[in-house]
Image (tube, rainbow, N blue to C red):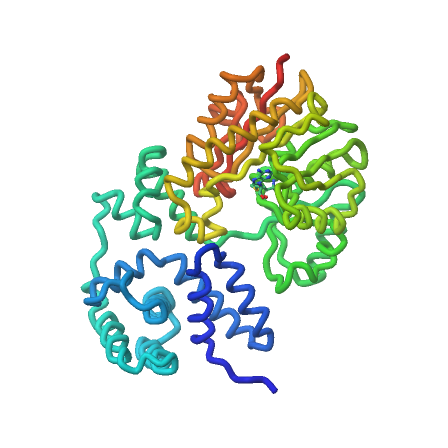
């Protein structure tokens, strides 16, 4: 028997889950959708949109609610807080739902959750907000930090940090791009397959395929319901990967027969791109810190059918003498603050802190320090992150080249002209969302000189 559920109640449950320590928004939403698979497509779309939108705009929504509620959002009971937030999202960020319906449903849900004495409060706040829409105030643009923080729902420290690093105009572009829908990008494998046939197969399954920038094998996909059901995916002909991340295997300048070590490899995006370039030759030692992570790599390796990848559990901060001076190429795609991928993972903007960023730098340097020993003399080390903070990127590279026998080497021979800029000749590239057509990403190519 199918039990009727209220979609707004599922939204509430999911938002409460999302706000638990250590929970990821996309996973909480996926869990709800998997549990209630029998829901209509429209209901699933509603749950996804309201949960994602409420989370994405949380700082702005709280700022709005606080203008109408005597009890500040942070002091509210979690259930009440999430009912209000998601209702405000429906009233102010979606066109299709009348204010009255949103208020009525919020009151019903409050009652259903047992908060009888708070139905009046919920009703009062929401109806006031609906009635006095035009009186809601937002920070002036001249008040740069507060304006950016509220308008784009990022913590003030982040707005301030970006302002310092990029200035107002660039920061606004970056933050605005975080709010835009991100296309799903895939890399079509080159080895052992025919690209035209893959494109045909995708189109025959009703998928819209569009060329992505910068790389000939990068494509945007849309119109799919469940990616793993696609033939091209199951047969290991496509791999989900942002174009910025694909560039790592390009600038590594992989040659047939190379021995490549990927130190922080899960779920295997760069490992798989490198193996594709090796075209059945050489070997990739693909490592990550836990068994669970290595299983993710292995799953992808099995699906794509590569035989030249060996996935293993290895802590990159622990020296491994067995590969000392052995690798033609080492990839250190280190754990980072992830500020470049906020557009895809909204949790990052609420969970990252200045202290955490600060504590990542020594870890990244520890990994670089070990990585330096694995490259054979004359070999190549690629350092990359999916973040845009100076200290994790150019800061670490400056530290590294002043302490180790490495020099930066131009990446221009490996990337398209559109990406050439002041720094690419010098050996590194900082991609910025909203400026580049990709996630935020940093990559550097270093040659071991002795
Ligand atoms: C940016 S992600 C890697 C993405 C991956 N290179 C790809 O392209 O799919 C960073 C990875 O570093 C791993 N990691 C964190 N600490 C590590 C350590 N001490 N040793 C090895 N890997 C570590 C994390 O588990 C995570 O999978």
Question: Going 45% across and 48% down the picture, which residue do you hit?
Answer: 342
Residue 221 lies, in percent from the top left, at 61, 54
| Residue 204 left/right relative to 3 | right
Question: Going 48% across and 27% down the picture, which residue do you hit?
Answer: 396
> From what the image shows, is residue 335 above or below residue 38?
above
Residue 23 lies, in percent from the top left, at 48, 57
- Which residue of the protein is positioned furthest toward the bottom in this rendering? 1
Q: Quadrant of ligand 1?
A: top right
| Residue 406 left/right relative to 440 | right
> From what the image shows, is residue 448 above or below residue 444?
above
Residue 438 lies, in percent from the top left, at 52, 42
Q: Quadrant of residue 287?
A: top right
Of the 4 image quadrants, the one containing the C terminus is top right
Of the 4 image quadrants, the one containing the N terminus is bottom right
Question: Going 44% across and 53% down the picture, which residue do you hit?
Answer: 347
> From what the image shows, is residue 189 above or below residue 373?
below
> From what the image shows, is residue 146 above or below residue 248?
below
In the foreground, 309 or 100: 309
Question: Going 62% across and 14% down the picture, which residue do you hit?
Answer: 449
| Residue 398 left/right relative to 208 | left
- Which residue of the protein is positioned furthest toward the top in this rendering? 450
What is the count of numbered marks?
A: 0
In the foreground, 397 or 173: 397
Residue 371 lies, in percent from the top left, at 61, 27
């Amino acid at each position: 028997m199918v039990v009727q559920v209220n979609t707004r109640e599922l939204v509430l449950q999911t938002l409460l889950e999302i706000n638990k320590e250590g929970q990821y928004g996309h996973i909480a939403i996926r869990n709800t959708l998997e549990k209630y698979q029998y829901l209509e497509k429209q209901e699933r779309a509603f749950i996804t949109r309201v949960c994602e939108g409420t989370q994405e705009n949380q700082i702005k929504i709280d700022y709005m609610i606080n203008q109408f509620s005597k009890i500040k959002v942070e002091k509210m009971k979690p259930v009440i807080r999430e009912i209000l937030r998601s209702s405000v999202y429906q009233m102010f960020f979606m066109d299709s739902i009348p204010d009255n319906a949103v208020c009525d449903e919020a009151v019903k849900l409050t009652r259903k959750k047992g908060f009888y004495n708070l139905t009046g409060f919920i009703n009062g706040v929401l109806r006031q907000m609906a009635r006095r829409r035009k009186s809601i105030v937002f920070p002036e643009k001249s008040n740069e930090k507060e304006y950016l923080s509220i308008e784009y729902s990022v913590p003030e420290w982040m707005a301030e940090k970006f302002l310092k690093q990029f200035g107002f105009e660039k920061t606004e572009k970056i933050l605005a791009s975080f709010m835009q829908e991100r296309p799903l990008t895939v890399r079509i494998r080159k080895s052992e397959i025919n690209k035209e046939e893959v494109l045909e197969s995708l189109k025959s399954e009703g998928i819209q395929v569009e060329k992505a920038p910068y790389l000939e094998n990068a494509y945007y996909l849309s119109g799919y319901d469940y990616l793993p059901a696609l033939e091209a995916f199951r047969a290991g002909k496509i791999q989900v990967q942002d174009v910025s991340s694909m560039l790592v295997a390009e600038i590594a300048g992989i040659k047939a027969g190379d021995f490549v070590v990927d130190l922080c490899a899960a779920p295997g995006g760069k490992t798989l791109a490198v193996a594709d370039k090796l075209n059945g030759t050489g070997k990739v030692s693909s490592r990550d810190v836990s068994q669970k992570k290595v299983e993710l790599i292995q799953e992808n390796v099995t699906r794509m059918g590569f035989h030249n990848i060996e996935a293993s559990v290895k802590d990159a901060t622990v020296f491994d003498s067995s590969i000392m001076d052995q690798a033609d190429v080492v990839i250190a795609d280190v754990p980072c603050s992830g500020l470049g991928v906020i557009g895809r993972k909204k949790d990052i903007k609420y969970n990252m802190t200045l202290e955490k960023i600060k504590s990542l730098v020594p870890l990244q340097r520890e990994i670089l320090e070990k990585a330096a020993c694995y490259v054979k003399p004359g070999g190549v080390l690629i350092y990359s992150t999916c973040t845009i903070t100076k200290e994790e990127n150019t800061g670490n590279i400056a530290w590294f080249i002043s302490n180790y026998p490495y020099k930066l080497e131009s990446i221009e021979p490996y990337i398209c002209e559109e990406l050439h800029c002041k720094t690419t000749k010098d050996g590194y590239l900082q991609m910025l969302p909203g400026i580049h057509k990709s996630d935020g990403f940093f990559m550097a190519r270093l040659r071991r000189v002795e």
